[in-house]
Image (cartoon, rainbow, N blue to C red):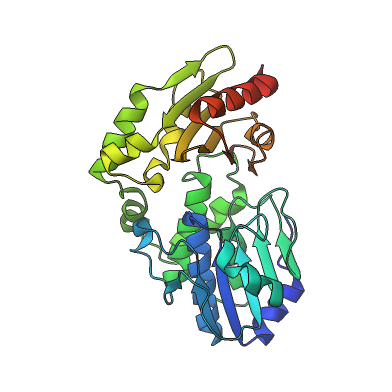
């Protein structure tokens, strides 16, 4: 794993004002990393703003965040834009694209295929979570991993390792978590805040989807569809489908789990998960998607039926 670049540390020490952002529809790693880096800048006495086009998801409102996460780029001048957990310059969304063209960027990410769009790039897919990279920054700056920084980093690393159950779990991320606990992190009270965020409507959505689960035994694929009608019937949104794909992996014989979610007519979001050596990145790449070896995704402009044929075809090519 690559260490924190010296030029990145210099930029944080010498700069006065920063804008911190991450990919739209942020997950726990994106939000946790943003919050942790914000707390670091607070301790350094820096000026900064937080931005995410999607805002702060409701399920993370318990997290102590150093400021408001703006849904539009805040006004003002910034020495640096720090982009977290984003494989390319488009991932933070359309509202910040112009600003990113005018201001120097620091790109901190762990996605394979990152386009190195920053003036300073620290990209290393060996790290299971960007949150671990933020922890290393704090340590290099001589800051103790305690309090809100520790909670934010813990959220980030457990989100992207599935509470240390995914294949990307490393000795380093386990040692980091042990350090956080030794420093006083209260996992007994923190874990329920992270995991127990489901609504009753989500349970109803899961029920509808599970009833129509499909299994293609000869290639070890489990597949579920979430239609716009299902979302409307249960009063749920796209975010309520998160985590459903992992339930398919619990079925004996399933090598690759796929969720197809109809976000708009003719537009389908695909989420793919695997365990062990099966690489879903290559499957997603067939559909112009990407991600990690055991967790990838894609968006296709197609009907649900067409998207099903496309993803099954890709699975057959790579798993048969």
In this rendered view, identify the residue nearer to me: 44 or 110.
110
Which residue does the image show at 38% across and 38% down from the upper left?
228
Q: Quadrant of residue 95?
A: bottom right
Q: Residue 56, image x and y in percent?
A: 41, 63
Up the image or down, 32 lies above or below 259; here it is below
Q: Residue 138, image x and y in percent?
A: 59, 72
In this rendered view, identify the residue nearer to me: 238 or 180.
238
Q: Residue furthest left?
A: 200
In this rendered view, identify the residue nearer to me: 115 or 226.
226
Which residue does the image show at 53% across and 37% down from the upper left?
270
In this rendered view, identify the residue nearer to me: 217 or 305.
305
| Location of the C terminus (image quadrant) | top right
Up the image or down, 78 lies above or below 133; here it is below
| Location of the N terminus (image quadrant) | bottom right
Which residue does the image show at 51% across and 79% down from the upper left?
74
Left or right of 296: which side holds 58? left
Count of numbered badges drawn on the protein: 0
Q: Is residue 179 visible?
A: no
Left or right of 308: which side holds 196? left
Q: Quadrant of residue 204?
A: top left
Q: Residue furthest top?
A: 218
Q: Residue 243, image x and y in percent?
A: 42, 40
Q: Is residue 97 visible?
A: yes
Q: Quadrant of residue 131?
A: bottom right
Up the image or down, 294 lies above or below 96; here it is above
Q: Residue 294, image x and y in percent?
A: 60, 37
């Amino acid at each position: 794993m690559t260490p924190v670049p010296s030029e990145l540390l210099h930029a944080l020490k010498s700069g006065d004002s920063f804008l911190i952002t991450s990919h739209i529809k942020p997950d726990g790693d994106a939000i946790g990393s943003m919050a942790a880096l914000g707390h670091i800048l607070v301790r350094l006495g820096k000026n900064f703003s937080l931005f995410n086009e999607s805002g702060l998801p409701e399920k993370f409102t318990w997290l102590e965040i150093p400021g408001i996460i703006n849904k539009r780029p805040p006004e003002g001048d910034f020495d640096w834009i720090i982009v977290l957990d984003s494989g390319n310059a488009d991932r933070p969304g359309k509202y910040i694209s112009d600003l990113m063209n005018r201001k120097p960027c620091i790109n901190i990410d762990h996605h394979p295929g990152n386009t190195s769009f920053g003036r300073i790039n620290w990209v290393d897919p060996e790290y299971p979570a960007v949150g671990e990279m933020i922890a290393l920054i704090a340590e290099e700056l001589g800051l103790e991993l305690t309090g809100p920084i520790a909670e934010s980093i813990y959220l980030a690393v457990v989100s992207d390792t599935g509470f240390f159950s995914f294949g990307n779990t490393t000795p380093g991320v386990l040692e980091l978590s042990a350090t956080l606990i030794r420093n006083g992190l209260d996992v007994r009270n923190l874990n329920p805040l992270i995991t127990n965020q489901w609504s009753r409507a989500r349970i109803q959505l899961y029920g509808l989807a599970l009833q129509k689960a499909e299994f293609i035994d000869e290639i070890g694929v489990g597949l579920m569809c979430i239609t716009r009608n299902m979302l409307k019937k249960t009063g749920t949104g796209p975010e309520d489908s998160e985590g459903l794909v992992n339930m398919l992996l619990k079925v004996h014989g399933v090598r690759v789990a796929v969720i197809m979610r109809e976000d708009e007519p003719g537009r389908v979001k695909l989420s793919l998960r695997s365990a062990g050596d099966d690489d879903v990145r290559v499957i997603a790449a067939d559909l112009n998607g990407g991600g990690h070896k055991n967790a990838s995704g894609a968006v296709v402009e197609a009907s649900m039926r067409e998207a099903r044929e496309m993803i099954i075809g890709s699975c057959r090519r790579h798993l048969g």
